[in-house]
Image (spheres, rainbow, N blue to C red):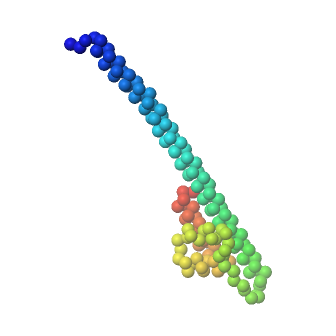
């Protein structure tokens, strides 16, 4: 048999050990939980920011396509049968931000860039914007 004094000492030591372990590990466990919550919150905020930025880019592309096409059609009307001066879309901010995301061949991009008054080219570029918008999960 174990002496009652020793049983009390051993019981107290074991109880003290577990109490210490809980008090030392408790904050660590809480910190881990809070850290994961904050990481998830940060990830969610970053995702929202990314989606907002993508929506703004798509809007800028659509506005750019519309305004540039209208401008070129108006130039064609004003020009009448006079000499034609080709202008490329290259260098326009909205087009340069769209160009790397296009899946069409470089020759087709060049053709679109130089013949943007043609409605077929506008539709082709608009279809690419719609594809990107769908790929990004914005629609």
Q: Quadrant of the C terminus?
A: bottom right
Q: Is 55 placed above or below 76 here?
A: above
Query: Would you say 70 lies left or right of 54 here?
Result: right
Query: Would you say 54 lies left or right of 12 here?
Result: right
| Residue under the image location 65 percent in, 66 percent down | 61
Q: In which quarter of the image is the N terminus?
A: top left
Could you say where residue 19 lies in the image, as x and y percent from the top left?
Answer: 40, 24
Could you say where residue 28 lies in the image, as x and y percent from the top left?
Answer: 46, 35
Q: In which quarter of the image is residue 86?
A: bottom right
Q: In which quarter of the image is residue 16?
A: top left
Could you say where residue 109 lies in the image, as x and y percent from the top left?
Answer: 58, 77
Pick out the residue farthest to the top. 4
Q: In which quarter of the image is residue 125?
A: bottom right
Q: Is 37 placed above or below 98 here?
A: above
Pick out the residue farthest to the left. 1
| Residue under the image location 65 percent in, 59 percent down | 56
Asked if one can make out residue 52 in the rendered structure from this viewpoint, the answer is: yes
Asked if one can make out residue 119 in the rendered structure from this viewpoint, the answer is: no
Could you say where residue 12 lies in the image, as x and y percent from the top left?
Answer: 35, 18
């Amino acid at each position: 048999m174990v002496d009652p004094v020793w049983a009390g000492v051993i019981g107290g030591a074991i109880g003290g050990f577990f109490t210490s372990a809980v008090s030392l590990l408790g904050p660590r466990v809480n910190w881990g939980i809070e850290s994961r919550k904050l990481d998830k919150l940060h990830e969610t905020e970053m995702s929202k920011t990314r989606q907002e930025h993508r929506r703004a880019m798509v809007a800028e592309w659509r506005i750019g396509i519309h305004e540039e096409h209208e401008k070129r059609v108006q130039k064609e009307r004003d020009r009448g049968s006079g000499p034609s001066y080709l202008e490329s879309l290259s260098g326009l901010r909205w087009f340069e931000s769209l160009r790397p995301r296009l899946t069409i061949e470089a020759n087709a991009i060049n053709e679109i860039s130089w013949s943007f008054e043609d409605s077929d080219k506008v539709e082709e570029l608009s279809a690419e914007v719609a594809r990107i918008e769908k790929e990004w999960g914005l629609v």
